[in-house]
Amino acid sequence: MSSARPRVRRSAAPSGRRTRLALTGPAALLAAALTACSGDPSVSAEVGGEAEAPDTSVSVNLRGTAAAPGGPVKVTLAHGKLKTVAVTAGEDGTLTGKISADGRTWTSDRVAAPGTAYTVEARDTQGGGDRASFTTAEAEKVNKLLLAPGKNTTVGIAQPLSVVFDHPVKNKAAVERALEVSTSNGTEGSWGWLRDHSGKDRVDWRPREYWKPGTKVTLDARLNGVDTGADGGWFVRDYTTTFTIGAAQVVKVDLDRSRLALHRDGKPVLDIPMSAGTPGGEKASWRGTAVLMSKEGTINMRSETVGLGDAYDKMVDYSMRLTWSGMYAHAAPWNAGVFGRANRSSGCVGMSDADAAALYGQVRVGDPFEMTGTQAKGTVAEGNGYGAWNLSWEDWAAKSALT
C-alpha cells in the first residue's frame, strides 16, 4: 500500500526557536496536514535550524492511492474537539457520519467503496481546519444484481422483493444489512436467502401476510462498498426500486375439481372450467401458492425445454408464467373436451380462448395463484418462481442471515 509523501508546513520563526502550528483562530490549521496526507508521523522537519517533531493531532485511518475499501472512514483529533467533517466521494458523492460524544472522532455511516477518490475536510471548534485525500483500491471482481419488481410498477398482493446476484454471496449478513425496505404502512416482513432456480444466490423479502392494497414500497440497497466474499466480489454502486400494491386479487385453482376462480376483495369475479396437469407423474401440476411472474402473451411452448421429450411444440395464447420450471396458465383450446371434468395437460392450467382472455385481462403480476388438491406432483419450491408463501412465517423468517 502506498502512502502520501510527508508534508510539513514551515513557520518563519526566529532562528534557534522551536515552533508548533497552533490553533489560534479561524485561519489557523488543524496542526499540520491530516495523517492521510502526512505520511509517517515519526518524520521530523527542520524549522529555524532545529528539528521539530511534526504535529499529527488529526489523523485519517485511510491513506494513499490504494487504501483498503470496505471499512468506515475515521477522522480522529488528538486534542480539542471536532466541529465539522465533510467527506466527498468521487465527483458528486458524499459520506455522512457522526462525531463521537467526546468530540475527538468522526466515523462515516457507510464504508469506503472500491476505486473511489475521497477528500476529507475537517474543522475544529476553535476554527482551525485542513483537508486530505486518499483513493481506495479498485475491486478485482464486481458483483451485480437483478431486482424485481421493476421501478414504479403496480403489482399484486403476493409479490415479493427479489434480488438475484450475479456471483456467490458468502457475506450474506453484510449484504442483508445494506438492504433497507420501507413501506407506507409499517408492513412487517423478512428477508430470506434461497437458491434461485437458475442456481444463483437470491434473497427475497416477503411480508408476514399478503400486502395490503395501496401499500407503497421502497428498497434502498446501499451496497456500494460491500464485499460479498470469496468468488463474489464487491458492489460498486447502490440500487433502488419502488412499487405500489394493487387490488386484492387471488386466483384459486382447484386441481381436483378442474375449476379456476378469480376473487377480488374477497368476492368471486370469474369462475372458469379448466384442465390442469395429468396426475400421476411429471406432467402433473404443482400445488401450493405460486405468484404470477409475467404475462407473456403468445409464446412458443416446446416440451423438451421442461424435460418432457417431444410431446408438444405449440404457439400458445394468453400465457401467464407461474414458475421458472415452466408451469403456466394459458389458453388450451385443444383440451376443450375435458375442461371442468379432468386434468389432461402437460403440467399447465389450460382453459378456453375466451376464458383465458378474460383472466389475462384482469390478473396482475404479483397476484397469487393458490392451487389445492390431491392431483399434484408436489409443492412449489421457494426458488421456483416466488414460492416463499409455501413456508410458514416462522420458517421463512429463519432464512434471514440476521436471525
Image: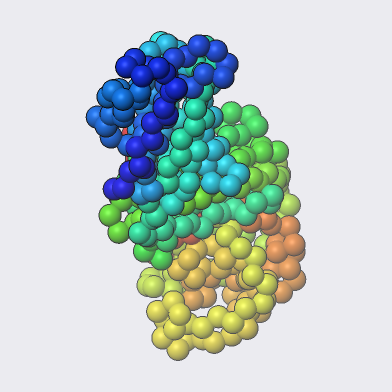
Answer yes or no: is residue 99 visible.
Answer: no
Of residues 333 and 324, the one drawn nearer to the viewer in this rendering: 324
Instruction: Specify how the rendered protein is coloured.
Output: rainbow
354 left or right of 367 in image: right
Asked where in the image residue 177 lies, by quadrant, the reply is top left
Q: Residue at x 59, y 82 (%)?
A: 300
Of residues 179 and 367, the one drawn nearer to the viewer in this rendering: 179
Q: Is residue 110 above or below residue 259?
A: above
Instruction: Give percent across and percent down for residue 55.
Output: 35, 22
Of residues 250 and 315, the one drawn nearer to the viewer in this rendering: 315
Q: Residue at x 35, y 42 (%)?
A: 5
279 left or right of 327 in image: left
Instruction: Give percent across and percent down for residue 304.
Output: 44, 83
Q: Residue at x 62, y 59 (%)?
A: 260
Q: Is residue 276 above or below residue 164?
A: below
Instruction: Give percent across and percent down for residue 41.
Output: 28, 30
Answer yes or no: is residue 312 visible.
Answer: yes
- Quarter placement of the C terminus: top left
Instruction: Give percent across and percent down for residue 171.
Output: 32, 46
Residue sitting farthest toward the front: 15
